[in-house]
Image (cartoon, coloured by chain):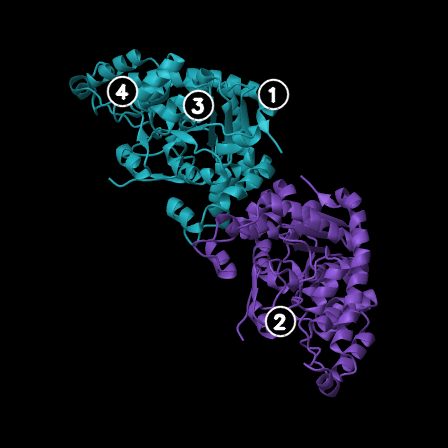
Chain colours: A cyan, B purple
Amino acid sequence: MAFKVTPWEVEGDIDYEKLIKKFGLDLIEDNILKKIKDITGDNHFMLQRKIFFAHRDLDFILKEYKKGNKFYLYTGRGPSENLHLGHLMPLKFTKYIQEKFGVKCYIQLTDDEKFLFKDKLSLEDTKKMAYENALDIIALGFNKKNTKIIIDTEYAKTLYNHAIKVAKKITFSTAKAVFGFKNSSNIGQIFYTSMQAVPAFLESEKKGKNIPCLIPHGVDQDPHFRVSRDVLPKLGYMKPASIQCKLMPGLLEGGKMSASVPKSAIFTTDSPKQVQDKIQNAFSGGKETLKEHREKGGNPDIDIPFQYLKFFFEPDNKRLKKIEEDYREGKILTGELKQITVEKINNFLEKHRKEREKAKKKLDNFLLKD
Amino acid sequence: MAFKVTPWEVEGDIDYEKLIKKFGLDLIEDNILKKIKDITGDNHFMLQRKIFFAHRDLDFILKEYKKGNKFYLYTGRGPSENLHLGHLMPLKFTKYIQEKFGVKCYIQLTDDEKFLFKDKLSLEDTKKMAYENALDIIALGFNKKNTKIIIDTEYAKTLYNHAIKVAKKITFSTAKAVFGFKNSSNIGQIFYTSMQAVPAFLESEKKGKNIPCLIPHGVDQDPHFRVSRDVLPKLGYMKPASIQCKLMPGLLEGGKMSASVPKSAIFTTDSPKQVQDKIQNAFSGGKETLKEHREKGGNPDIDIPFQYLKFFFEPDNKRLKKIEEDYREGKILTGELKQITVEKINNFLEKHRKEREKAKKKLDNFLLKD
């Protein structure tokens, strides 16, 4: 089945094996998991479950870390809409890595990008949304001392001054080949990847020496960092390492999460009732009738509520496995599985909303401004 | 004879009549000169001599001015090298217009552009040169209250925030058609015109209402402002008006001024001896032998020292005409004409150097910074 994955478009059923080959990524093998566990005493469930499944140079990052050469983290988010759970997932993982390794983290909110790529959004819209998204990010518990949030338009002087150095090394044909630009693409879109490259060497720039950078990100963003990895050595910086996650599925059949289809995703701003309704309507792997389900069992592999537990809401492997097996055997009904998921999401969101409220006071401590 | 005029390349003998048609400019006709004289009581010699020879919407600017709706000026300079006389010429004219009309002026120093378009220059080089060029500009006597100098990288936050609004309205095909970009062009070059567009609406932006903008500039920069005129109305701003000057010829035969050929231009940093030597070597319209010159006369139309008097150093029309006639009739020898020119240039530069020294203390008052 055909699929398409670019930083701005994801279509069809993604075949991650094919994607790895196409993008030239490495799978996260057991030996890497072992190295992480040696250092941190643990492996995050998203690593164990191959949700974070691929990487570039993660082994190098770990080797340097063991030598005492700490890396820093860089991740980001395009603030075109309120955050949904699919956005929170890699951010939550990043926060975990920060905590376990005790490292600095830059989080870039690309309000310029979203303005340039979304016809209908004004720069005021995306900037406002960047501030909203920042609250959700802070609410996840990022370390105040070690975390800096960059809203592109608020840090544009610093970013632009570095971005043009990147831009000078990227020809139009490279950008076209990697991102598929057309004659109708606007010239801001064409330039933009230079801005996204900057946090990948910003810490080295600030410290005046090369500091390894690790970028956890959704696999759709890989084209940006492929370009960054090509360019940064030409500017005297190391290639940034990266670690890629799969994209959390949308709630509806075969779909992705989309702001234009509110029922396709659960946003951090959704009420408990909205969560209940959305999960109720989510695509299920259960059978049509109660009788058939009890007899033949459900299919958790395609069941969205189950996938939400797997991607995010059931960190305990044993409990997840029990739910999976019971569902497959028809011991758990579709409605029951959905109810488990609703409760877990609502528990999470209740706490999240409180933290998000508190984040309003913390915001200034996190933002980098020119 | 073939010629090429782009913002980054000028080649061959420019046929200004053809260029006007190609670019779609209007000639500055006598009725416009009359309107200017009605307002200011005067016409600058560069207007009378058709050195500033073409325009877009200058009549609109004058009409609005008479109604009490003042325009503001915007001009600029790409700081790849020290300023030479060909750069000072339009700046001197701009200063005159500022004085006569009592208007505000923005002067943009595009260190980002020069970095992006000149392989060998680092951003540190062009930024440093921007500061050097700023001193020359201030030395010309621009009004401290009414003049703001923008060094792009120092004002990048403001510029970038506006530039992306421009960029969103310019497709790659437009940029390619206007500027001739190729697959090998870097993506910073492709984006750059958006940055150059910003001062054309910056005053309107700051004041929260549309203020007419007049851009005096060398005709080679017209492609940028053609694009700006196309885009700005889409953002709710007026089309900027413009007034174009011819390019001052280089000192050597058929050549242009070029930093890589030091003998082709006189820089503000040249010593009196260097000026003497350069004019001595300049291409002349005089005859080969003294006898022939006395008999047949020289040709001021192709004589570079004479052109320097015409473009810049002999504001008095009567005196210029006398020199021209005497030269044409062989009464003035090549060496004499050169000596007149050397003296005028050195007188100008002596005063300029003093003002340039004083400018160092004034710089901070002129610079716009984020």
Residue B358 rendering spot, x and y as whole percentages: 81, 48
Q: What residue is shown with label 3?
A: A94
- What chain does mark 2 sit on? B
Relative vertical location of residue B121 with respect to residue A35 in this rendering, above or below = below
Residue type marked 1? Lys
Residue A290 rendering spot, x and y as whole percentages: 21, 19
Q: What residue is shown with label 2?
A: B253
Residue type marked 2? Glu
Quarter containing the C terminus of chain B: top right
Q: Which mark is first along the chain, 1 or 4?
A: 4
Q: Are marks 2 and 4 on the same chain?
A: no
Q: What element carries label 4?
A: helix
- Say which quarter of the image contains residue A11: top left
Does any portion of residue A166 appear in the rendered image? yes
| Marks 4 and 3, how far apart at CA | 32 Å
Q: Which of marks 4 and 1 is in front?
A: 1
| Marks 4 and 1, how far apart at CA | 41 Å
